[in-house]
Amino acid sequence: MPTDLRVPLRRALGTALCVVTVLAVLAAGAGVRRLEYTTLAAGPAASPAGEVFVVTANLQEAFNRSDYRNLKEMGVFVKRLLDRVPHRPDVLLLQDVRRSAVRKVVELLTKKTGDRYRVAQKLRKEPWQKLPNDVWHSTETAIVVNVATMELKGKEGFVRIRNPWGNPKGDYVEYKGQAYARAIERDTGEVVGLMSVHLPKEPSEAKKYAKRFGPWVDRLATFMKKRYPDGTRVIGGDFNQTRCLGKDPCKEAPFWKVLTSAEHGYTDALWWEMEPRHWKKRLPLGVDLIFTTGGVENAGGDVKNPPVFYSD
């Protein structure tokens, strides 16, 4: 069975408070009314009607046994999330999570906000699945939606990408699952195609490895366009690549150029919002990103060090 050598989140980061969270408010396109629940809502207010508030987070809660048996960090994540964000999330794109962690996030968000949250995918108990011919499927991405504001409708599943660096010994082949789902924004009836991605981690930051990411995201973007041709499309998650290769002057990474090309037409929500501040204050460029074919109202991020930065 494949093993994961990553250090538990508590040891690597001290606390789940350091998990990077990026978010975006997307402008939607008359539709299904939002649902009202009688439970006591807490935390931030709902997103404005006609907008979709998207959060992505790599929770590092998938493979290390000593880590995922203790789900207290999910409580820390949800508390920090609701303390920091301007709206209750409509969509969460999660990476590096197993079913138990996703369910815990859903449970806590539902309890603390009063809105009902739901997992879009049918998740296996274990993120690894052994198949014939020494093939393994890793499935540690998921999509969670706020049922009060979004309606899941249509097929959901995973698009798989072969990980060329997942097994140094070469005794099995890993295919990483990228979660996708179709949701409808209740106020407008706008279709929103969603994808949570966790791309393979390259052996180094050498440019020869960065070239592999262009074809991968091209395949994902093409899949989304065919499946949701008339909807707003969102691809977000842990890309394991930053926008720029090297330091100034910035040379745009292949994956970023592909997604923002005229052919696919995505906007990097974080870059759209933070570009002016980046050049002024030299803000860091991370690997956790949200791309969309729709309009972007606001975007921001949350990391403990360097300081938190947000826009409302």
Image (cartoon, rainbow, N blue to C red):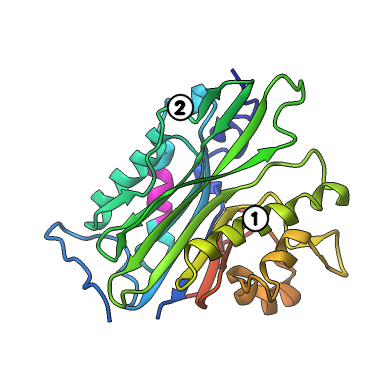
Q: Position of residue 308 (x, y in %)?
A: 56, 62
Quarter of the rendering containing residue 161: top right
Quadrant that contains the N terminus? top right
> For the residues marked 2 and 1, what is the alpha-carbon distance in whole angstroms?
26 Å
Q: Which mark is residue 219?
A: 1
Q: Report x, y in % for residue 153.
A: 32, 58
Local SS, label 1: helix
Q: Vertically, is 280 above or below 75?
A: below
On the image, the x and y values in percent for residue 192 come to 42, 67
Q: Is residue 242 left or right of residue 116?
A: right
The magenta stretch is 75-81
Q: Main secondary structure of the magenta part?
A: helix
**Snapshot quadrant of residue 271:** bottom right
- Which amino acid type is shown beneath numbered disc 1? Arg
The kind of residue tagged 2 is Glu
| Within-10-Å neighbours for mark 1: few <14, some 14–19, many 20+ | few
Q: What residue is rendered at 80% in x and 38% in y? A: 203
Q: Nearer the viewer, residue 10 or 184?
A: 184
Which badge, 2 or 1, comes first in the chain's sequence?
2
Q: How many marks?
A: 2
**Where is mark 2, residue-wise?**
126
- Taking depth in this image into account, of 165 and 219 the one nearest to the observer is 219
The single residue placed furthest to the left in the displayed view is 38
Is label 2 in a helix, a strand or a loop?
A: loop
**Furthest residue to the bottom?**
30
Is residue 76 placed above or below 234 in the rendered structure? above
Within 10 Å of disc 2 (Cα), the crowding (few <14, some 14-19, many 20+) is some
Q: Residue 80, position in %: x, y?
A: 43, 53
Residue 310 visible, this orientation: no
Q: Is residue 76 magenta?
A: yes
Q: Is residue 80 visible?
A: yes
Residue that appears at 40% across and 81% down: 29
